[in-house]
Each structure stands twice: as structure tokens, then as C-alpha cells.
Image: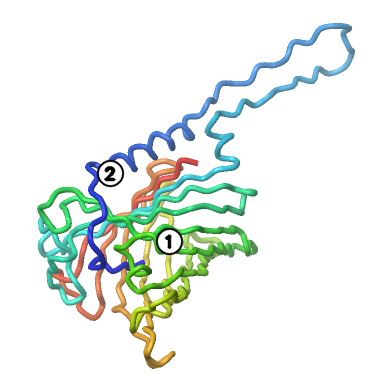
Amino acid sequence: MLVDHREGEILMKLRNWEAVVLGGLTVLASQGVFADTSPPTSPTVTGTAVTGPTVSTTTTQQSVWDKIGEKATLSFFGIYRGAPLSDLGNSLQPDTGGNLDPSTPQSVESYLTAGYKFDKDTMLGVGAHFFYYPVGSPVGTGQDIQMYDPSIVLSKSNLINVGGLKVTGRIYAELPLSSADRLQRDHDSIAISPTFIANYDVPHTALTVGAYGYITAYLPGSNLAEHARSYKMYFAPTANYQLSKRVAATLWVDLFQITRNRGTGFVSGMSNYTVDIEPGINWDITDKISINPMINFYPATPTLAATSLQAVIMAKAF
């Protein structure tokens, strides 16, 4: 999901934030992976002996993290965007034409979500959205954090779960709490994003095909800025081929990234960002931590200068 890196000013600077977030989630995740696995003890039976087969009773001990995980969720999702393949040592990202832009340094766009689970499929939570700049923004100013608008999220898994097809639905309500983000700048009151995630396991193969998409409606507040964005539509087909238990080949295509500003035609005012393709390899380091390095290239400009190294990082505490 593309986010405009040029918007706003830095709100706060925190040293080693990425290490704190990922390190903390790694510790929490390891608690879940290495929970108490000692065998349960059988109760002692006293009293009159009963003839016939002996029936033993066992109890399973739950770890604290397992109990928390029944009702709570805490997860991290990050997208690292790096240098062009033609100059991997550079601190800047390339644009669609292969030019280095001083306003787009290497970054990790990050989402930290915490929520309450009403049942195994339904979750209500809050999400923090921020950018981490390992080389600073501007480059050379030291590690930086730039906070963006937080959101409230309602998620429902298994809206459809039949014949290998699984669909998850989510609704995000983005709140205008950051002066660095679009909502305050355009004087919008809120942004609502119905979102879907669909996956289909192709029978008798290791292939899963899917799609991710959303529509964002920007609801105006008072003193709405001229030509403020009115909506955005996004759609990405995906594919995943499992090479082994923990390694898979992946493909993500940013096919439609359509926006329309107010004061333009509802359809004629649509503007679609350049299509990009991202093949990669996903490695599930543990059941709760994975990294997916990939190459981002634009079919319209298939050059090393316009092709960059990226990676998706995911961690789940519970």
C-alpha cells in the first residue's frame, strides 16, 4: 500500500525505535512459541478399587500468553523500502522513472495493532501508523520517527470459508490526529476504509492465489481544502507458492491505486498510480515472525535504476 512520503513534517524523533518494536514483539512472540510444555500430572486416586480398565485423567496447563491470546491480539506489520538495485549503497529510494528523490529516504512504514477478540474470528482494536527512517529524513539527520493518523479497526475472519476460499473483512476508521498526515491538511473529519483479503488454495497444489483491496472515503469537515481527496480505490492480486514448510515464493502486484480529488469528474477525475510488481521469497522464521524480501519493479520502466529492494516484516505476539 503506497503512502505519500512527502507529506508533513517530522513530529517526533526516537532513537532505535525499530529495535524496540521488533525486539519487544520478538520477545513476546517467543513467549508464545516456547510456552510451558511440561506434561500434565495425573491425579492420585484413593478409595475403593474398581474392577475393569483403568481410566486416567489429564489436565493441560495454559501459559499466561496463551490465556492472553484467547482475548487479545498484538501485531506488527512493516514495509521496508530501500535503494535502487543500480546503487544499493544509496540512502534514497527511486521514483517510477529511476530518479533519486531527496524527499524519499529509505524507510520502514509501520503498523502496530492491538485489539480485543470477541471470538476467534472477530476483533476490535486500534492501530498506530508511523514511518521509521534509519538514515533520517532528510538523510543524515539521524534516525527518525514520523507519526501518521491512528485508526480504529474492526476485523472479521472467515466471512467466507468454503472449498479452499477464505475471505477476511475489515473496516478502518482513520482519525485526524496527526498534522503530518492528509486528514488534518485537507480538513477532513474521518476516513473510512472497507477492506477485504481473499485467498484461494488451488486443489492438489502448493499454490495459493488471492487479492487485497479497499475503498477509502474521505468525509469532509469544516473549511475543507480545495481539491481535497474524495476517495481512493486499491486492488492487488497476489500469489504464494509453498516451497517448504517455512519458505514460499510470493508475488504482489499493485494493479490499481486510483484516487480522485474534489472538483473533478467522479470518473474522469480518477488518477491511477503506476503499476508495480513485487516478486519475493517469504521465510517464516517462527510461527509468529516472518520476513519477505522482494524486488519492486515498474513494467513501464524496467531498469535497475527504477527497481528497488523492499521487504515485508511481520511479527505477532498473540
Up/down of 308 relative to 50, above or below: below
Pointers 1 and 2 in contact (CB under 8 A)? no
Amino acid on which the number 2 mark rests in the picture = Trp
Amino acid on which the number 1 mark rests in the picture = Asn
Outermost residue to the front = 223
Image point (56%, 64%), residue name: 169
Image spot of residue 275 (x, y percent): 31, 77
Crowding near pointer 1: few (<14 within 10 Å), some, many (20+)? many
Q: How many callouts does the rendering have?
A: 2
Image spot of residue 240 (x, y percent): 43, 61
Image point (62%, 25%), residue name: 61
Local SS, label 1 = strand
Image spot of residue 276 (x, y percent): 30, 73
Image point (59%, 42%), residue name: 71
Crowding near pointer 2: few (<14 within 10 Å), some, many (20+)? some
Residue at image mark 1: 240
Q: In which quarter of the image is residue 158?
A: bottom right
Local SS, label 2 = helix
Q: Nearer the viewer, mark 1 or mark 2?
A: 2
Residue at image mark 2: 17
Q: How far apart are marks 1 and 2 (CA)?
A: 31 Å
Up/down of 31 relative to 126, above or below: above
Left or right of residue 83, residue 263 in this image: right
Q: Which of marks 1 and 2 is nearer the N terminus?
A: 2
Q: Residue 270 carries which label?
A: none
Left or right of residue 42, residue 245 in this image: left
Q: Quadrant of residue 220?
A: bottom left
| Towards the viewer: 128 or 214 | 128
Image spot of residue 184 (x, y percent): 36, 68
| Towards the viewer: 227 or 143 | 227
Up/down of 265 relative to 89, above or below: below
